[in-house]
Amino acid sequence: MIQVCPKDMPAIRILPDVVANQIAAGEVIERPVAVVKELVENSIDAGATRIEIEFRNGGKSFIRISDNGKGMPPDEALLSLERHATSKIREAADLNEILSFGFRGEALPSIASVSKFTLRTRAEGWDHGTEIFINGGKLIHKKECGMPVGTVIEVANLFNSVPARRKFLKTDPTETAHITYTTRLFAVAHPEIAFHVVDSGRTVFQSPSCSDLRDRIGEIWGRSLADDLIPVEAEDSSLGFRLSGLTAKPGVGRSTRRELITMINRRPVDSRTLGFAVLDAYLGRIQKGRYPPAFLFFHLSPREVDVNVHPAKREVRFRNDAVVRRFVLGAVSDTLSDAAKPASTEKASVPEVTPVKPQDETVEPTPIKPATTPTPVPRVVPAPQRSSKTKVPVARVLPVAPQPPKETALPETEAEPASAKAPEWKLLCLLKQRYGLFETPRGLVMLHLRHADQRVRFEQILATFDQEEAARQQLLIPIPIEFEPLASEALKTELETLNSHGFEIEEFGRHFYRILSVPDWMAPEQVEAFVRDLVDRFRQRGGSRKDPKLTWELVARLAMEQSYQRNDNMSHAAAQKLAETLLCCETPHTSPSGKPTFSEISWSEWERRFGN
Ligand code: ADP
Ligand code: MG
């Protein structure tokens, strides 16, 4: 079948308004990367499975996008250059439904109005293609040409005819960086499409079509980043929301947000709503000021989102921001919590607190030394119900594991998991009394002993909140403690919470209290100062709302802050144990105040550094 382009195609229909197009170009095409973006979007819309992007001088002097999409028959090719000509929208009602990238029908005429523009295209079923050449909005020629099915668009001398715009362009390297970044986004959004990006004759990246997002990320950003990601998959069918993709493992952070990438219905967009929801999910899970790399695809009904807030379509607006935010935050948070859990073979779910000092495990409730004695000789009164806790697996315990008393002995299998993890991280040496250097299957890890210890201690104390009966140590001689009236009030409101979690503090007169027992994680000689500090914190926090869990968090935080002297001269065994315990924590990567607990350099990173 040979079809011939109608000779009488009225030229008047083409580019009726160069000025309007140039104005539109000002909005849609701010810089070379915008041209790339519009053209690649068109190629994707045209069903291409292979897209080649070439450019020179940051796209200022030359951009060429070639695709193997469905192409255009001759008359359509001419029409595509008319303002508001678009094949993608037939009537206004479609506006909400439109899934394809562009629908304004503005891009091609806008670009053609501010450059030397060549369109070559051939549709399926035609034995020749069409070449149209336009310079600064003026049609120079239209002729047949030979080419495979698909479309090739060349844009040369961008903004040459509009010096005012040209002035605003940045240096070549900057414009190049924008183009490279944008093409990477497209490649990630569409792993099924093969991309080849060429800057001044040099391949920037080339990625064949692949079915796996992780592979694609590995090809473009490097394997070590790809390995640092875990899958996210969440759906709410009643809302019509779905979130999928890959996100940073807890603790993996970058110094910029450039690798925090979100797509909405597969369109790369910078959405504040999505970005903040993801960042919130990582609060406390990565260091402050760092950003998690993530490649997340958010899908929702096109009716729920307005993608055309901005002419260049970089912003989106959700119909219901808060709902989207909650969904995304929840989905990512859940993923991270799951990831932080130990291997599924472990039955333990709550890290149980065990007394810090092994010799503390005594079977008989024997009141011990006076509180004033500094020596930490046996002083524990195990909670009477201790043996009833045998149902709680003591999997993840403490730096120094005591021999459990017979009554509380646990089945071997349940006591094992922590040590089963031991081979994963092998302590090589202790350094400067502050660090432990470990070898792991993935690389070398430097552990910050104090931060790690704080994290472990914090979570262990937090975990006692959920225990029915916290282990406590009874003081031989109760400690009297007096407060001024406001402080006394503050303590009084929290007394119940404290007393149900290992403390035993009773009111003893006006603003006068007695401390009878302390939780078994606390050194009795510290308790008076501790309670005073704690009351200060209660008062600083202010407010009358009573939330036992928050109160307990304050307790854990204070205890953690005061724990740091403990690591001087830590033994090898204790450091090894600390690492194992840390790995069982819910949030192992940061201390409770957000500082990193360890830093890993992967073997692949070593290889990279040695140029292999
Ligand atoms: P829009 O994408 O908003 O429709 P454009 O100006 O970007 O507007 O493109 C106009 C029309 O040209 C498109 O609707 C499409 O029919 C056609 N077109 C543009 N680029 C291609 C391409 N690479 N392959 C096939 N058709 C294309
Ligand atoms: Mg378009």
Image: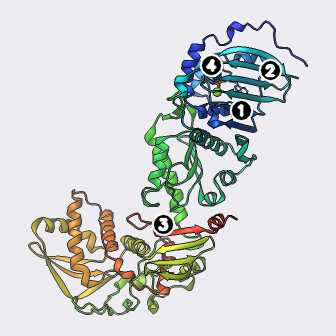
**Residue at (58%, 73%) from the top-left corner?**
444
**Tag 3 or tag 2, which sits nearer the N-term?**
2
**Residue at (55%, 63%) from the top-left corner?**
339
Mark 4 burial class by Cα count in 10 Å: few <14, some 14-19, many 20+: many
Q: Are marks 3 and 1 in contact (CB under 8 Å)?
A: no
Please, what is the three-letter code of the amino acid marked with disc 3? His
Task: Please provide percent x and percent y for residue 108.
Answer: 65, 23
* Viewer-nearest residue: 570 or 17: 17
Task: Please provide percent x and percent y for residue 135.
Answer: 68, 18
Label number found at residue 113? 4
**Residue annotated with mark 2:** 130
Distance in Å between CA atoms under marks 4 and 3: 54 Å
**Residue annotated with mark 1:** 64
Residue 366 found in image quarter: bottom left
Distance in Å between CA atoms under marks 2 and 1: 16 Å
Task: Please provide percent x and percent y for residue 431.
Answer: 48, 80
Under tag 2, what secondary structure? strand
Q: Quadrant of ligand 1?
A: top right
Label number found at residue 260? none
Residue 388 found in image quarter: bottom left
Q: Is residue 385 visible?
A: yes
Q: Are marks 4 and 2 in contact (CB under 8 Å)?
A: no
Mark 3 burial class by Cα count in 10 Å: few <14, some 14-19, many 20+: many
Q: Is residue 194 visible?
A: no
